[in-house]
Amino acid sequence: MSIAPTRVLGTPVDRLEGRDKVEGRATYAYEHDIENVAYGTLVVSTVAKGRIRSIDGREALAEDGVLAVLTWEQAPKLPKAEGELAVLQSDRVAYRGQIVAVIVAESYEAARRAERLVRVEYGVEEHDVELRADHPTLYKPDKVNPQFPTDTEEGDVERGLREAVHSIDLTYTTPGYHNNAMEPHATLAFWEGEALTLYDSTQGAYAYSETIAQTFDLPRERVRVIARHVGGGFGSKGTPRPHVIATAIAARHVERPVKLAVTRQQMFALTGYRTPTIQRLQLGCDAEGRLTAIAHDVVEQTSTIDEFAEQTAVVTRMLYAAPNRRTTHRLARLDVPTPSWMRAPGECPGMYALESAMDELAREAGLDPIELRVRNDPAIDPESGHPFSTRNLVACLREGAERFGWRPGGRREGRTLVGMGVASSTYPARKRPSKAHARRNADGTFTVQVGAVDIGTGARTVLAQIAADTLEVPLERVHIEIGDSDFGNAPVAGGSAGTSSWGAAVVQACRVLLTGADEARVETEQSDEPLAKHAFGAQFVEVRVDVDTAEIRVPRVFGMFACGRILNPKTARSQFIGGMTMGIGMALLEQSRVDPRFGDVVNHDLAQYHVPVNADIADIEADWIDEDDPHVNPMGAKGIGEIGIVGTAAAVANAVHDATGVRIRDLPITSERLLPELRK
Ligand code: MOS
């Protein structure tokens, strides 16, 4: 049931709000002009575990312009608050950087000054923040995110490995990563009686309204969350973070609007991160390169106050076929902030290990790494037994290789080692229930409202394109309104499911208008077709390594994707190459370095937490094969927000090995790690 005929869908429409953003007129959460607003800032714990023995805000409160200093002793009790959102609810400190006081002042400067005057004494307890494969707290969670079985087993992996002609048994590690969106987490909260309004930098206005209402024990309708423009999230704004609760508490206390932005340094404890992982991969194949066994055993971490179980090995269940397969997840409970979503949670770290391991097995077996993958491409989903709605991984590998000029083997040019790497990529293609509202206006235009959030992806623009095509009118006649929980249930901009889900609701609402109605309110349903729905892709990377310094440069990256119909090639390309850029960062630069003595991240700013900048990225391009998948949503599209990052780090690692003959299995691949190996 695809939309036809296409008019603006599939064309590179500029972002509708692009000009507003460039000219500084797009209003972000912190920038809303609200009368009588006060400024909130946070005092955070300087120990990783213990109790607050005493906390004294009197000196801070005496400062000029300071309106309130709230600690656990004055803050209202929130019996329904859970885990990290139980802000200022007790004297207990569960991680370093946890909120211990909120300051409210007439100016930002006064609030920051006052922070330093809050006297806190801690009863310090010994903390443990280091993930180890043999950590004594390791346990098996009941499920991994969001609802997957923790472990799976089919056949007998040990037998499959014994029968294999070629096999590997290797361990890969990834460090913690922080999302580091450009716009810091920020919120502006005000109460009108028992009703709370928040201008917030969020990926999900409606989902936030639900969680915040629950935390304050209010009916959902009493909490309104507005997010007109959001400067990135990468998952870290997919769930309300503690500062949102702190700000709402503060606004109620001073009976004024309060706005608060988390500082870059505070973000490293308060706004989520990707768990570090330790991943053991065992693969075996026969003489023809057919996998006889796949085992993927993961160790990762959660906190002492919440459970977050990253679904790291879940992707291994569906990517390649083998008669004997096993996946497991174990968590250590550490005195750390709770991990959370970061672009492609699960698939991203999991595919780094799996796709590195496939490369290593290909070399063992003397096969081209593309050929090994092609030989193990399953006809049906090995996990569920369901057919794939569409699966074009092989086409991405083959066509990508052609386009990239795939010639691995490594060569030396003077003092430079040159090599190529490839990896597969995949991400689930989801559609979630969503409401939408469409109205015909007297002037011949249409207004479409949907509780979507555009976190910089171009979602607003694409939704307008979807509405225009469904209504068969020019784009100029569609007014699209998003970013408001009052528009009703709509999923977060996450799981690469935003446009897929909101778009399906927009199509359904607009179709009602086509029947002659002036107004339509719809809600789409969850589909339960027995199909495995996933997007696929393949990344190709060329690296150049300096033999004297082991500096790694990435002159060329190409991604070939199969993600259903591409609704806007301009914004889609940005998603793909943005994801791949983040994957290069993961491979070579990014790592949240925890100092075990202090118990948190020491490189907690962008001067020390390195992400790729323009100088790090040279020729990067993405393209896609023609695919129209009618099973995910009526647009024929699959989500594209996350697949770009999945696989990229493995492709870089594989290229470094191709260039140097050295395999670094612990990310990031820094010169410090590579140089001693090059010298051997
Ligand atoms: Mo994404 S990590 O699903 O916001």
Image: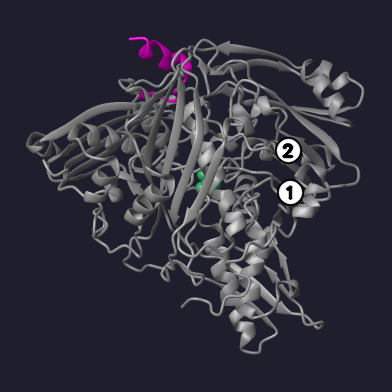
Q: Which residue is mark 1?
A: 198
Give the residue drawn at x 54%, y 79%: 4
Q: Which residue is mark 2?
A: 247
Vertical comparison of 152 with 220: above or below: above
Q: Is the residue at mark 1 in contact range of ligand 1, meaning its CB lies under 8 Å from it?
A: no
Give the residue drawn at x 11%, y 37%: 164
Give the residue drawn at x 84%, y 22%: 61
Q: Is residue 598 visible?
A: yes
Tag 2: amino acid: Thr
Q: Earlier in the sequence, mark 1 or mark 2?
A: 1
Vertical comparison of 358 with 536: above or below: above
Q: Is the residue at mark 2 in contact range of ligand 1, meaning its CB lies under 8 Å from it?
A: no
Tag 1: amino acid: Leu
Question: How much space separates mark 1 and mark 2, taking CA atoms?
Answer: 9 Å
Neighbours of disc 1 within 10 Å: few (<14), some (14-19), many (20+): many
Q: Is residue 569 left or right of residue 229?
A: left
| Residues at circles 1 and 2 in contact by the CB criterion of under 8 Å | yes
- Place of residue 218 in the rendered image (x, y in percent of width and height, measured from the top left): 65, 52
Residue 603: quarter of image: top right
Q: Is residue 674 left or right of residue 338?
A: left
Circle 1 — which element? strand
Residue 392: quarter of image: bottom left
Q: Is residue 204 left or right of residue 148?
A: right
User: Which residue is at the front of the view, 274 or 657?
Assistant: 657
- Place of residue 676 in the rendered image (x, y in percent of width and height, measured from the top left): 39, 10
- Place of residue 266 in the rendered image (x, y in percent of width and height, measured from the top left): 66, 26
Circle 2 — which element? helix
Q: What range is drawn magenta here?
A: 664-680
Neighbours of disc 2 within 10 Å: few (<14), some (14-19), many (20+): many
Q: Is residue 303 visible?
A: no
Q: Quadrant of the C terminus?
A: top left
Give the residue drawn at x 51%, y 57%: 497
